[in-house]
Image (cartoon, grey):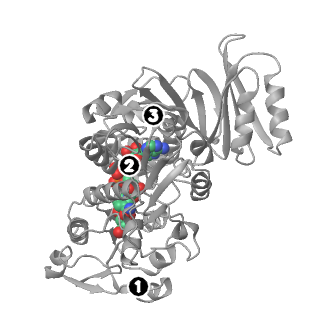
């Protein structure tokens, strides 16, 4: 008999099919600590969670029979994916079931903000008939939506019906799709400067962490309102409080927090201009049923060795293919990550070219790693080798793969070009050198020789005397040690690049100072993990 543990409150109706299955026993034990879970998890073949249970490495290590972890919801940030992958535990989620519900929550928050509904309610039930609450209309206001995926797009549709003008930003949002949605494609800067309301709908990734912080608040319209029903930390809580005190922010509505639950003395819980809810975005009867049904169905398929979808981590790959390709997986993902970090435009096409030895093998699994790397900058832990091609497709990113036996001087070469909607492109090529390991050998049109590890600093500048010295001095003065440096240019006095390996991450302020140096065009930190 297969055993399934449900460790968070999950809709009974949603898990009915699991409970009805003759080969499955379902046990519900909610509110368990990590240690309590460690004690019992070995008995179970599957674990079903929402967001409360933190599925740690320790729990997985104890889960000797665990084949699948089902997350009834979207975000899998409460599950240690790496540990699951390492142990061959499949992690699945239910990405679509709570989209509308969460969108409606964000919209409800926006309306409550506009009309002070929670504050007015609290006064009224205390016996104070206070009619001084003066709201604003949504009509004719500008709404900025950061993250135009499933939820952000639904919010935009509803805001249009309310007569709002919508500015949207998403790295995968092209002019064409924005037109289709009837919104204006904008940059983050345009959104923060012009929006009366801002709502965020991105995952929490290193890039989206504090994407709205002091710098962004400083240029916002005085009296704007802001909503976070995505993930705590996308909006910098401390910076938001300062902006509220300065009158830049008139009101804020948060469903999610940097630390959940927030401490009892968290300033958001005691500020009359901030509306809070306890991560209720997905909490409707419909959404909870939807996600539980989706996830139960997939868990049953996995337990019965049937084909399944929505796996968030490693899929099985045939051993023969695996043996040939495995050495390239890390490099492929690194090339994808690197090229995505260099690109700042909405991506239309990712062109992967395999040369030399690689032209003779079925490279499909490797392409998945490359696309995963290219998308992970924006999808964070939501993208994996199972869903990377699918995510690219739903975001209208065309994947082109070509092969050539010509070796260009290397026995194997992976070249990845990101083509943007505006016609620009960025290119990275890498190889595995026998005895030396992975190397990045080309950045755009410049040949380089870089080990893809540690912290890289990528600088693009005009080829003028003194630049290398300036960079070295500035980094030295800020205690950033340079381990290696490479420079490249095509013509004397023309466009040039500098790639430095540094011993620690370069602070934001130092990058800003670098950019202030003469002849500098770009200074960017690149990370490989
Ligand atoms: N409050 C809740 O209970 C609740 C419920 C469901 C989902 N969520 C959260 O809401 C968020 C959105 O969910 P979704 O289902 O719409 O996900 P999605 O993957 O469909 O959309 C997320 C979008 O964010 C974009 N993005 C990534 N980096 C970005 C950046 N730097 N700037 C702008 N956009 C960026 C991605 O390209 C993607 O289109 C997720 O964080 C999810 O975990 C919260
Ligand atoms: O289970 C929940 O209520 C959280 C849902 C939400 O944050 C998600 O990522 O799906």
The earlier-in-sequence mark between 3 and 2 is 2
At 25% from the left and 32% from the top, the residue drawn is 180
Q: Residues within 10 Å of mark 3 (few under 14, many from 20)?
A: some
Q: Residue 89, how many percent across, how many down?
A: 38, 68
At 70% from the left and 36% from the top, the residue drawn is 512
At 80% from the left and 26% from the top, the residue drawn is 468
Q: Which residue is mark 1?
A: 31
Which quarter of the rendered image does ligand 2 occupy? bottom left
As displayed, is residue 358 above or below residue 266? above
Q: Which residue is mark 2?
A: 136
Q: Do the residues under discs 3 and 2 have CB atoms within 8 angstroms?
A: no
The residue lying furthest to the top in this view is 492
Distance of label 3 from label 1 (alpha carbons): 53 Å
User: How many marks do you count on the picture?
Assistant: 3
Tell which of 475 and 100 is nearer to you: 100
Q: Which residue is mark 3?
A: 357
As displayed, is residue 455 above or below residue 118? above
Rendered image: mark on residue 301 = none
Q: Residues within 10 Å of mark 2 (few under 14, many from 20)?
A: few
Q: Secondary structure at mark 2?
A: loop
Tell which of 318 and 120 is nearer to you: 120
The earlier-in-sequence mark between 2 and 1 is 1
* Mark 2 beta carbon near ligand 1 (under 8 Å): no
Q: Disc 2 vs disc 1: which is toward the camera?
A: 2
Tell which of 503 and 278 is nearer to you: 278
Q: Residue 55, how many percent across, how many down?
A: 45, 73
Image side of residue 237 versus residue 470, left or right = left
Image side of residue 118 versus residue 259, left or right = left
Distance of label 3 from label 2 (alpha carbons): 64 Å
Q: Residue 30, how many percent across, how many down?
A: 36, 85
Pick the quarter of the image with the N terminus: bottom left
């Amino acid at each position: 008999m297969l055993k399934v543990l449900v460790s968070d409150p999950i809709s009974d109706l949603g898990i009915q099919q699991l409970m009805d299955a003759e080969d499955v026993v379902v046990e519900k034990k909610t509110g368990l600590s990590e240690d309590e879970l460690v004690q019992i998890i070995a008995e179970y073949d599957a674990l079903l969670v929402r967001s409360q249970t933190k599925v740690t490495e320790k729990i997985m290590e104890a889960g000797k029979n665990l084949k699948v972890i089902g997350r009834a919801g979207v975000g899998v940030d409460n599950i240690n994916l790496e540990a699951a992958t390492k142990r061959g535990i499949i992690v699945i989620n239910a990405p679509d079931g709570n989209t509308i519900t969460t969108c409606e929550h964000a919209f409800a928050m926006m309306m409550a903000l506009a009309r002070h509904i929670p504050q007015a309610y609290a006064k009224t039930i205390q016996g104070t008939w206070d009619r001084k609450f003066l709201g604003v209309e949504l009509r004719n206001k500008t709404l900025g939506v950061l993250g135009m995926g499933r939820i952000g797009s639904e919010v935009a549709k509803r805001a249009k019906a309310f007569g709002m003008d919508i500015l949207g930003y998403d790295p995968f949002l092209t002019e064409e799709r924005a037109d289709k949605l009837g919104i204006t494609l904008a940059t983050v800067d345009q959104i923060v400067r012009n929006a009366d309301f801002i709502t965020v709908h991105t995952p929490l990734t290193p890039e989206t962490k504090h994407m709205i912080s002091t710098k962004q608040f400083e240029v916002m319209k005085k009296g704007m309102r802001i909503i976070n029903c995505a993930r705590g930390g996308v909006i910098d809580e401390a910076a938001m409080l300062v902006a509220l005190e300065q009158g830049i922010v008139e009101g804020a509505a948060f469903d999610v927090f940097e630390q959940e639950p927030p401490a009892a003395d968290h300033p958001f819980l005691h500020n009359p201009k901030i509306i809070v809810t306890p991560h209720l975005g997905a909490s409707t009867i419909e959404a909870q049923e939807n996600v539980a049904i989706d996830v139960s169905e997939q868990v049953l398929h996995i337990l019965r060795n049937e084909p399944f979808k929505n796996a968030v981590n490693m899929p099985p790959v045939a051993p023969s293919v695996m043996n040939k390709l495995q050495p390239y997986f890390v490099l492929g993902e690194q090339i994808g990550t690197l090229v995505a970090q260099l690109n700042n435009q909405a991506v239309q096409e990712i062109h992967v070219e395999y040369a030399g030895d690689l032209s003779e093998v079925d490279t499909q699994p490797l392409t998945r790693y490359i696309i995963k790397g290219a998308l992970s900058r924006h999808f964070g832990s939501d993208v994996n080798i199972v869903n990377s091609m699918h995510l690219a497709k739903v975001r209208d990113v065309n994947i082109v793969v070509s092969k050539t036996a010509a070796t260009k001087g290397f026995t194997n070469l992976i070249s990845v070009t990101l083509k943007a909607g505006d016609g620009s492109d960025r290119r990275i090529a890498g190889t595995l050198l026998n005895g030396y390991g992975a190397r990045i050998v080309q950045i755009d049109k410049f040949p380089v020789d870089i080990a893809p590890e540690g912290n890289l600093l990528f600088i693009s500048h005009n080829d003028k005397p003194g630049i290398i010295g300036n960079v070295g001095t500035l980094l030295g003065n800020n205690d950033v040690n340079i381990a290696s440096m490479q420079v490249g240019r095509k013509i004397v006095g023309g466009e040039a690049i500098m790639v430095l390996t540094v011993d620690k991450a370069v602070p934001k302020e130092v990058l800003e100072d670098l950019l202030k140096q003469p002849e500098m065009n770009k200074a960017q930190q690149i990370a490989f993990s």
